[in-house]
Amino acid sequence: MFNSNSSISTKGAVRNAATSKPPRNWRVLLDWGKYVAYAALIILVVWGWPSIKTTLAEISLGKVEKVTVLGDLTYVPENEVVEVLQPYAEMSVVMLPLSEMQNKLQQISWVDRAVLVRKLPFELIVTIVPQKPIARWRNEGLVNNRGEIFLVDEIAEEFALLPVLSGDHDALQEIMTTYIGINQVLRGHDLDIVSLQRNDRGAWSLQTDDGANVVFGNDGIAEAAKRFVAVHKYLGSEAANKRFDTRHNAGVAVL
């Protein structure tokens, strides 16, 4: 061993002992220092684990203390929302089966979509997105903006003036497509659809807000709607309450 001021000579070169590796004894001490540090860290973790474990247990076992429901609940039956959520009240917030709860909420007639979010440690936030009806389906329910039927116990007065769509349930998508196409033609001429019906043979009948009744065949409806509009515009106020048969390729019969 040599002190920090000593040096040795090798082939005329001078090397300071301070730049050389520490002696083996010092390296052993350094290695032992690392082991002691690691051991101390492990002891601290083990010593602190009970308190960490207790905190996690408190969170995981904490029951739902608060449920916040957001969204327009004007027509959503609140008692049905409560019936869905009530069975989960005794569960831990972190253990709530959100997907299962969401599916059940979305089966309620006026609920289009439900979003559930945990707010630890004890709160559940539920956001209800209600259905947006654009038409009535027969006298049984309503049709949303995606062309899906949802049944309701009673059609509110607010939706009584929505157009009524009728036909076979399996033909709903075709009925919605036809309704949208005809509506685009009529809206440009200040006419609104009161009802649209598709019969079992695939033919169509339409009533407008001025009382005009229009009969269509089972194809070429968009062009037929344009012919009807042209004749309706020509007749002006006399078109009200008239019957228009568009099943003629060359024109429209007015009865």
Image (cartoon, helix red, strand yellow):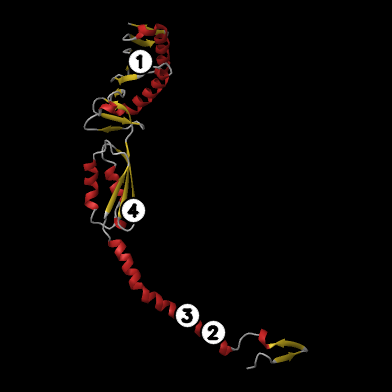
Residue pointed to by mark 3: 37
| First reached walking from the N terminus: tag 3 or tag 4 | 3
The 10 Å Cα crowd at callout 3, few under 14, some 14 to 19, many 20 or more, is few
**Percent x, y of residue 173:** 35, 28
Q: With 191 as the anchor, is 91 left or right in this view?
A: left
Q: What residue type is labelled 4?
A: Arg
The 10 Å Cα crowd at callout 1, few under 14, some 14 to 19, many 20 or more, is some
Alpha carbons under labels 4 and 2: distance apart: 49 Å
Q: Residue at x 27, y 58 (%)?
A: 92
Q: Which one is closest to the eye, mark 1 or mark 3?
A: 3
Residue 30 circle label: 2
Q: Is residue 1 above or below residue 105?
A: below
Residue 118 circle label: 4
| First reached walking from the N terminus: tag 1 or tag 4 | 4
Q: Dividing the picture into quarters, in which one does residue 195 lie? A: top left
Residue pointed to by mark 1: 217
Judged from the image, the secondary structure of the residue bearing numbered disc 4 is strand
**Percent x, y of residue 77:** 23, 39
